[in-house]
Amino acid sequence: AELLPALVKLRLPLVLDHLAMPAAPNDSAFADILHHVRDGAVWVKATLCRVPRAGPLEALRPLHDALLRANADRILWGS
């Protein structure tokens, strides 16, 4: 997330995988990512296998839902 503002300025297609790997739904870095998703500046891949702090799968639902609310057209399915 630290590099995201500089990368967005390059105006290249950016894809963040593994739900952008946030620490928590209320993480300030995740709020920044949501801002860029909302603006259409980045895509986020909905893959779960490497979200390190995920815990049970149900714990990821708030992250998933927040990304969809931000801009559902910028969420990609991944495997």
Image: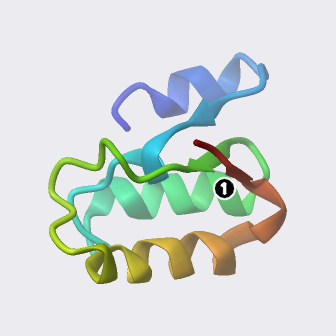
Q: What percent of the width, then of the height, locates residue 62? A: 40, 82
Return the residue nearer the eye: 19 or 48.
48
User: Residue drawn 77% across and 55% down?
Assistant: 74
Q: Quadrant of the C terminus?
A: top right
Residue lying farthest front? 79
Return the residue nearer the eye: 2 or 50.
50
Return the residue nearer the eye: 8 or 21.
21
Q: Answer left or right for 57 relative to 38.
A: left
Q: What percent of the width, then of the height, locates residue 55? A: 15, 68
User: Residue drawn 53% across and 22% down?
Assistant: 6
Which quadrant of the figure has residue 58? bottom left
Above or below 9: residue 43: below
Residue lying farthest right? 73
Q: Quadrant of the N terminus?
A: top left
Which quadrant of the figure has residue 15? top right
Above or below 65: residue 46: above
Q: What percent of the width, then of the height, locates residue 61? A: 42, 81
Q: How many labels does the image show?
A: 1
Q: Badge 1 is on which residue?
A: 37
User: Residue drawn 30% across and 42% down?
Assistant: 50
Give the residue type that dot 1 points to.
Val
Q: Answer left or right for 36 relative to 6.
A: right
Which quadrant of the figure has residue 42? top right
Mark 1: give few (<14), some (14-19) or many (20+) Cα within 10 Å: many
Q: What percent of the width, then of the height, locates residue 69? A: 66, 81
Q: Which colour scheme is used?
A: rainbow
User: Residue drawn 54% across and 37% down?
Assistant: 16
Describe the element under mark 1 as helix, strand or loop: helix
Above or below 58: residue 8: above
Return the residue nearer the eye: 19 or 36.
19
